[in-house]
Image: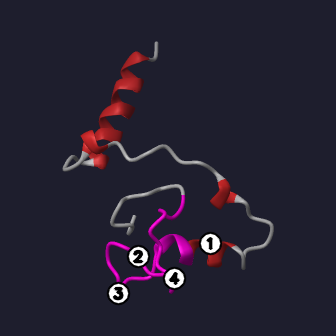
Amino acid sequence: MNCPKQLRNGPCGGVRENGNCEVEPDMPCVWVQAWEGSQRMRADTSILKVQKPVDQSLRDTSAWLRVTAERAASQDEKP
């Protein structure tokens, strides 16, 4: 995720007129680029799927360790 605001469902209201980010003025908005790219894809509406917000409580933790621990726990629960 390259959005400085960590937005997952589209651009914020601060996209500049030239399509750049309001937080990083020299950086193109990743969501403007994503939308333009999605328009070149054949019949793919994946970009319209709403994602859950970023869980900030997990910041500075390891996704790999979390996923591994969750899988191990689910294996332990099976009979």
Residue on which disc 2 sits: 21
- When asked about the image quadrant of residue 67, the answer is top left
Q: Which residue is denoted by mark 3 in the rendering?
A: 26
**Quarter of the rendering containing residue 39:** bottom right
Please name which of the two marks, 4 or 1, marks the residue nearer to the observer.
4
Q: Main secondary structure of the magenta part?
A: loop
Q: Secondary structure at mark 2?
A: loop
Q: Tell me the number on the disc at residue 35.
A: 1
Distance Cα–Cα, label 3 vs label 4: 12 Å
Mark whose residue sits in front, 3 or 1: 3
For badge 3, the amino acid type reads Asp
Q: Quick one: quadrant of the N terminus?
A: bottom left
Decide which of 26, 34 is in the foreground and name it.
Answer: 26
Type of amino acid at the residue the image marks with label 2:
Cys
Q: CA distance from mark 2 to mark 3?
A: 7 Å
Residue, far left: 60
Label 4 vs 1, first from the N-terminus: 4
Which amino acid, mark 4? Answer: Glu
Residue 30 image position (x, y, % from top left): 47, 73
Q: Earlier in the sequence, mark 2 or mark 3?
A: 2
| Classed neighbour count for the residue bearing mark 4: other residues with Cα under 10 Å, few (<14), some (14–19), many (≥20) | few
Q: Please tell me whether mark 4 sits on a helix, a strand or a loop.
A: loop
The magenta span reads: 10-33
Residue labelled with disc 4: 17
Do the CB atoms of the residues marked 4 and 1 lie less than 8 Å apart?
A: no
> What is the C-alpha distance between the residues marked 3 and 1?
19 Å
Name the side, left or right, on which 5 lies relative to 57.
right
Q: Position of residue 50 (x, y in %)?
A: 59, 48
Q: Is residue 29 left or right of residue 22?
A: right
